[in-house]
């Protein structure tokens, strides 16, 4: 059984004020403090792998863990943000009310593919994966629905995470509340 601790990246400022490529947007100073606090919470056991969206802010969220455990951060493109649940490439002309739903389904499917890649690489280990605030709940909703599980609370702010435990036949999802004394 693999255990995947799934977190959204820490605070990186207002995306609307960033005029460059969103993948280059770094964590703010607050986000760096949040990443350090999250690393403390997630260091309560062995960590065998670190996986991230290509976005700099996701990789920076995992840097304190990489330093603590001496692990590289592996980038997985399928953990990339959706930018408002854009529909799959080439699916132009969808009705406006349908486009976000198709984009959300596409994002959840991509993130599920990322989980399969992680499971193949470290099938009986504990890993930490960092994605985005839109991808994480989409993936959790997909896993809950596909596996007949009870829907956990969603995170509307940083500082909480989900633990996914999976093997070839079973999946479970555990919700972790926002950490006490989490920088905000």
Image: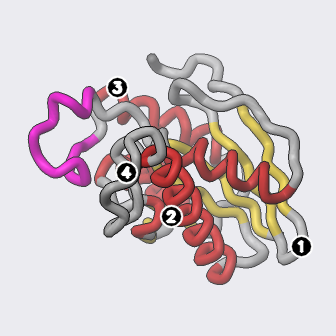
Q: Which of marks 4 and 3 is in front?
A: 4
How far is the residue under mark 1 from the one under mark 4?
A: 31 Å
133 left or right, relative to 180:
left
Report x, y in % for residue 42. 64, 45
Q: Nearer the viewer, residue 39 or 157?
A: 157
* Labels 1 and 2: the sequence-earlier one: 2
Secondary structure of the residue carrying tag 1 is loop
> Which residue matches tag 2?
51
Marks 1 and 2, how far apart in space? 23 Å
Label located before the other in sequence (1 or 4): 4
Secondary structure found at label 3: helix
| Rendered residue at 42%/36% (across/down) | 10
**What x and y, as percent, mark residue 105?**
56, 55
> For residue 33, what is the image quadrant?
top left
Whether residue 25 is in magenta: the answer is: yes
The residue pinned by badge 1 equals 169
Report the disc number at residue 30: 3
């Amino acid at each position: 059984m693999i255990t995947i601790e799934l977190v959204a990246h820490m605070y990186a400022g207002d995306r609307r004020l960033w005029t460059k490529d969103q993948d280059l947007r770094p964590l703010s100073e607050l986000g760096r403090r949040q990443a350090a606090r999250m690393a403390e919470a997630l260091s309560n056991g062995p960590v065998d792998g670190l996986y991230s969206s290509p976005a700099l802010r996701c990789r920076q969220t995992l840097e304190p863990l990489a330093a603590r455990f001496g692990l590289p951060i592996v980038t997985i493109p399928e953990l990339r943000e959706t930018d408002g649940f854009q529909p799959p490439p080439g699916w132009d002309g969808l009705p406006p009310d349908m486009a976000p739903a198709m984009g959300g389904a596409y994002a959840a499917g991509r993130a599920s593919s990322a989980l399969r890649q992680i499971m193949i690489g470290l099938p009986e280990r504990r890993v930490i994966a960092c994605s985005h605030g839109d991808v994480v709940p989409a993936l959790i909703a997909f896993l809950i629905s596909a596996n007949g599980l009870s829907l956990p609370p969603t995170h509307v702010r940083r500082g909480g995470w989900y633990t996914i435990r999976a093997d070839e036949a079973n999946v479970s999802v555990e919700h972790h509340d926002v950490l006490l004394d989490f920088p905000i």
